[in-house]
Amino acid sequence: DVKVTQSSRYLVKRTGEKVFLECVQDMDHENMFWYRQDPGLGLRLIYFSYDVKMKEKGDIPEGYSVSREKKERFSLILESASTNQTSMYLCASSTSSRTGYEQYFGPGTRLTVT
Amino acid sequence: GESVGLHLPTLSVQEGDNSIINCAYSNSASDYFIWYKQESGKGPQFIIDIRSNMDKRQGQRVTVLLNKTVKHLSLQIAATQPGDSAVYFCAETRFYNQGGKLIFGQGTELSVKP
């Protein structure tokens, strides 16, 4: 079974802090994604990566950065957390094998910025 | 019961009835579609997918119908059970795209009454 793990289920940070969210997948997937999920707004793509050291902006990249130094790990960084970044953050991965683009999701990190 | 995507985001059905969840997708060039189920406190999970060269695909208790003429996708759940209570998302993409980026719908909440 594909497993996508996220470093924390719940996180509370103060405004202005630097926040790291880590995601690890164990299926040797090429593609990895970071989303945020807010009530009424669905899943919004922040950044994605289709290869090591490659990154592409999604729909809402402002205030975020990412790092992908190893194939299995994709990190989301909030350089200076703000209260409007309080949200559920979901990581996902998928293969580029052309058999389909099913994304496998982690359990999510609920981040609260106070 | 029947839901019409964004306009009726909540669907309530009686246990044992069939459920129909609808989704209007946005891009006429999309040729691959996925349905996800998200239970409370968990990440989305893959249910079923369909490519645009098909009109219908069946899984275990679920059927996805695709109408490309009107850009409409539906998920039918037979004999709905309490464990089916969740938010259901449709997602669309072009099958051959670098990175496997998906576009998600807003979601429909399915509530099953015992």
Image: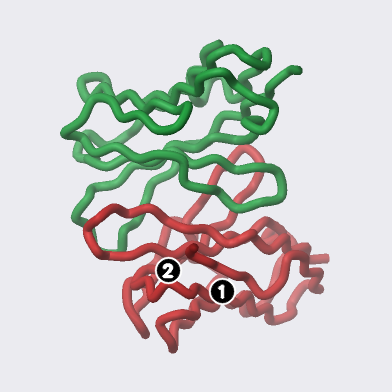
Identify the residue under disc 1. Answer: A23
Q: Residue furthest left?
A: B53
The mark that comes first in sequence, 1 or 2, is 1
Numbered-mark total: 2
Residue B81 is situated, as x and y percent measured from the top left of the image, at 64, 25
Is the Cβ of the residue at disc 1 closer than 8 Å to that at disc 2? Answer: yes
Dot 2: chain letter = A
Dot 1: chain letter = A
Residue at coordinates 43% horizontally, 37% vertically from top-left? B90
Identify the residue under disc 2. Answer: A32
Colour mapping used in the image: by chain
Residue B86 is situated, as x and y percent measured from the top left of the image, at 64, 35
Q: Up-down: is B42 above or below B66?
A: below
Q: Quadrant of residue A82?
A: bottom right
- Looking at the rendered image, the quarter that the N terminus of chain B falls into is top right
Residue at coordinates 47% horizontally, 46% vertically from top-left? B46
Q: Which chain is green?
A: B
Residue at coordinates 81% horizontally, 69% vertically from top-left? A12
Residue A48 is situated, as x and y percent measured from the top left of the image, at 41, 67
Residue B82 is situated, as x and y percent measured from the top left of the image, at 69, 27
Residue at coordinates 40% horizontally, 33% vertically from top-left? B59
**Which one is in front, B5 or A25?**
A25
Q: Chain A is which colour? A: red
> Callout 2, which amino acid?
Met
Indicate which disc residue B97 carries: none
